[in-house]
Amino acid sequence: MKRSFRGCVVQIDERQHAERRHEAATRLGDALRALRHSRNLSQEQVALDAGLSVDTYGYLERGQTPWGRDANPRIDTLLRIFTVLGVDAPRLLREAETDGEK
């Protein structure tokens, strides 16, 4: 698939994109689970405090949707979860950015 960005045409390999999306969803789920465990919280506690169903939160931790697709949560949902887990989202993004530069 071709995309245009600031006058440049970028070719996106759909298979590679799907693999990256799957890896990102899995890593996000693993990170959420690790953060929750480090705070001795249950899935139910995080879900209810974030205004989500327990099932929805559980699927996010597994990196998937109820239909077996890769999880793709809204920013609002992530911010709610991060707030419950005590995660500073801007700091998390800065750390991810500096990790990518190494």
Image (cartoon, grey):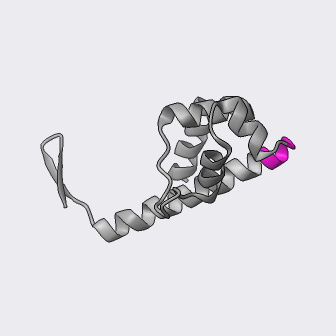
Quarter occupied by residue 82 = top right
Q: Quadrant of the N terminus?
A: bottom left
- Residue 38 covered by magenta stretch: yes
Write the residue at 55% across / 54% down: 102
Q: Is residue 15 left or right of residue 52?
A: left
Q: Is residue 25 above or below residue 83?
A: below
Residue nearest the viewer, comparing 5 with 69: 69
Provide the major secondary structure of the magenta segment.
helix
Q: How many marks?
A: 0
- Magenta segment, which residues? 36-40
Write the residue at 60% across / 41% down: 95
Quarter occupied by residue 90 = top right
x, y percent for residue 66: 53, 57
Q: Is residue 44 left or right of residue 81?
A: right
**Farthest residue in the bottom direction?**
15
x, y percent for residue 77: 55, 35
Residue nearest the viewer, comparing 17 with 48: 48
Quarter occupied by residue 91 = top right
Residue nearest the viewer, comparing 28 with 44: 44
**In this view of the protein, can residue 22 be seen by the observer?**
yes
Write the residue at 75% across / 52% down: 34
Q: Is residue 67 left or right of residue 1?
A: right
**In this view of the protein, can residue 94 be seen by the observer?**
no
